[in-house]
């Protein structure tokens, strides 16, 4: 028997950093939402007691460095499971992009193994376990739209944004999340208004959401990689209603309400950027054109 799980990417509609903690992590306040760009995870029981990672994507590690491997290992250790599993990862989310691809794969493995191994854990319990693997994993266990605080592991559900299209453009550079946090100078940061963003979500106020997107990590990544700024400018030029870098980058997203506009931005950006995607915001409540 095989168990299938979808592992959707996330974007940060707002990302604020409050201070650096003694444990070297940063206290954050973020609004995250899942988008319709997903990896597919397939879990198959093995006769041998091992965790096997299979993926055709050459950037995906096939050993303990894979967050999906770590998710399976944590569950095995915690619950004394003496069964093996093959984890097949069909990768659609670009790697090291700021879209939480690895974290979402790990979250999908937690949800899937909870079923396969009949552990009967709640999403909250799985999210707590996920926090041991990475700061974005707890959010990815729940998906949807949420405020994430602490180092990212404290999750409060929020209403989904109004239906809209998301254009993603990833420059061909890799970004280390750790390096971006280390280069952040909080004295110079311009902080997004998180309560106002939450209010806009509650009011289903698309323009309000667009007006309030903000990411304190964006200037840090832009300083190191000028491509990110260029892509942002092109997205604005081609008519996006809001433009922001996701997470620690380097992927930039643009929001629009109409598919025709999304297509125009896509066509315009293809000239500058190899990896461009048009996807829907997940959990939108109004039918899209
Ligand atoms: C940038 C975001 O993706 C926004 O959603 C997250 O804050 C980062 O989440 P992540 O990639 O799951 O991060 P982790 O794997 O837990 O941490 C990677 C590194 O990022 C830095 N880090 C991460 C999260 C956080 N709240 N403060 C940090 O300073 C730490 O140096 C850490 O060693
Ligand atoms: N399942 C996985 N898929 C992709 N990369 C993985 C996975 N597990 C571990 N990695 C490693 O993690 C690194 C970061 O990849 P990932 O795609 O998760 O980054 P990201 O989207 O920037 O994450 P985040 O937004 O959570 O900071 C990669 O360079 C890769 O070596």
Image (tube, rainbow, N blue to C red):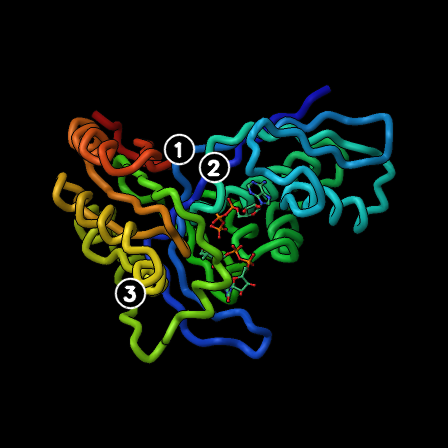
Q: Position of residue 128 (x, y in %)?
A: 63, 55
Question: Pointer 3: what residue?
Answer: 192
Q: Position of residue 116 (x, y in %)?
A: 73, 31
Q: Position of residue 182 (x, y in %)?
A: 46, 70
Number of numbered discs visible in the structure rendering: 3
Report which quarter residue 14 is drawn in: bottom left
Question: Pointer 2: what residue?
Answer: 8
Question: Pointer 1: what residue?
Answer: 36
Q: Position of residue 23 (x, y in %)?
A: 59, 74
Residue in view at x 73 percent, y 19 percent: 1
Residue in view at x 30 percent, y 31 percent: 278
Tell me how far mark 1 sits from mark 3, CA to CA. 25 Å
Q: Nearer the viewer, residue 177 or 135?
A: 177
Tell me, yes or no, if residue 77 can be seen here.
yes
Tell me how far mark 2 sits from mark 3, CA to CA. 25 Å
Q: Residue furthest top?
A: 1
Q: Is mark 1 within 8 Å of ligand 2?
A: no
Q: Nearer the viewer, residue 202 or 216?
A: 216
Q: Is residue 211 left or right of residue 71?
A: left
Characterize the local packing of mark 1: few (<14), some (14-19) or many (20 or more) Cα atoms within 10 angstroms: some
């Amino acid at each position: 028997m095989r168990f299938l799980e979808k592992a959707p990417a996330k974007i940060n509609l707002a990302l604020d950093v409050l201070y650096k903690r003694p444990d070297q992590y940063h206290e954050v306040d973020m609004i995250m939402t899942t988008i319709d760009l997903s990896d597919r995870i397939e879990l198959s029981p093995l006769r041998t007691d091992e965790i096997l990672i299979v993926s055709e994507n050459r950037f995906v590690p096939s050993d303990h460095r894979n967050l999906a491997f770590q998710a399976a290992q944590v569950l095995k250790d915690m619950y004394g499971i003496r069964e093996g599993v093959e984890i097949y990862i069909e990768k659609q989310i670009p790697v090291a992009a700021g879209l939480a691809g690895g974290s979402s794969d790990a979250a999908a493995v937690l949800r899937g193994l909870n079923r396969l191994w009949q552990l009967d854990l709640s999403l909250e319990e799985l999210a707590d376990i996920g926090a041991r693997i990475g700061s974005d994993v707890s959010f990815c266990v729940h998906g949807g739209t949420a405020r994430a605080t602490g180092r990212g592991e404290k999750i409060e559900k929020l209403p989904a944004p109004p239906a809209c299209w998301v254009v993603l453009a990833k420059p061909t550079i890799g970004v280390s999340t750790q390096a971006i946090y280390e280069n952040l100078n909080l004295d110079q940061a311009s902080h997004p208004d998180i309560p106002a963003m939450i209010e806009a979500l509650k009011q289903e106020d698309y323009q309000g959401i667009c007006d309030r997107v903000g990411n304190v990590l964006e200037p840090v990544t832009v300083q190191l990689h000028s491509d990110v700024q260029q892509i942002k400018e092109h997205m604005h030029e081609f008519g996006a209603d809001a433009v922001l870098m996701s997470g620690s980058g380097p992927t930039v997203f643009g929001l629009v309400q109409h598919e025709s506009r999304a297509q125009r931005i896509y066509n315009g950006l293809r000239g500058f950027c190899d990896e461009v995607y048009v996807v829907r915001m997940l959990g939108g409540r109004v039918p899209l054109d």
